[in-house]
Amino acid sequence: MFRIKINNDVLLGKIDYDDETVSEAIHSTYSDYSYDISLWWNDFVIPLDRRGDISEMYNDIIFMLNELKRNEKELSISFLSSTFTAKWYIQVESENLRILSKWITIEFSNHQPCDNKEGTILIVPTLEFINEWNNLLRIIKNDLIKVGYSENLEGFNYLKTL
């Protein structure tokens, strides 16, 4: 199972007029590092925060989604954040994605250790996987606009399509 549960009760920060990229703007938009996102990976829940994790992972998420939308059959993506560092090897199999994860560091919400850092496999419908990420990105886009950011930010192109 793959899900992204989002707590929308978050405090928004202020626009930083020196921000040039979406990643920088995400960091400024969210005022604290509270775990407000739960990424469900099979039976595990990985807590994420928008200010740290998502701002650090934003470009990788967009790269991954663009590759999937271009119908790439295989890709790998590396995530480096304060909550988890991992490499995902993604294969498209008909209507599903087969994702082999190599966890380097990870913190689960119940503080369970990752027993299998060598790899865990997740099989998820492609559209469901993309929609889960898009739902999160849509909220982030709206929050960026609420605090005063515009489409002029570097990396905003994907958000325009949501």
Image (cartoon, rainbow, N blue to C red):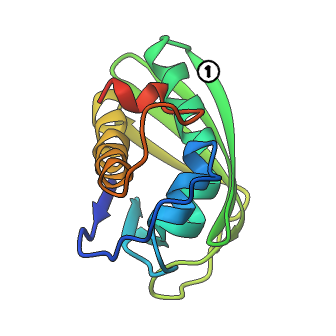
Left-right relation of 142 to 67? left
The residue lying toward the viewer, choosing from 2 and 53, is 53
Above or below — where is 30 with respect to 33? above
Is residue 87 visible in the rendered image? The answer is yes
> Residue 136 in the image: x percent, y percent?
34, 50
Query: Of the residues shown, which amino acid type is indicated by label 1?
Result: Glu
The residue positioned farthest toward the bottom in the image shown? 111
- Circle 1: element type: strand
Q: Quadrant of residue 60?
A: top right
Q: Residue at x 45, y 87 (%)?
A: 110
Percent x, y of residue 62: 53, 34
**One can see residue 1 in this view:** no
Image coords of residue 144 (percent x, y): 39, 51
Q: Which residue is mark 1?
A: 74
- Count neighbours of disc 1 (C-alpha within 10 A) and say few if under 14, some if 14 to 19, many if 20 or more: some
- In the picture, the quarter occupied by the C terminus is top left
- Give percent across and percent down for residue 158: 44, 27
User: Which residue is rendered at x = 44% and y = 17% of the image?
Assistant: 69
Q: Residue at x 56, y 59 (%)?
A: 16
Up the image or down, 74 lies above or below 136; here it is above
- In this picture, residue 105 sits left or right of residue 4: right
Question: What residue is drawn where x is 55% and y is 26%?
Answer: 91
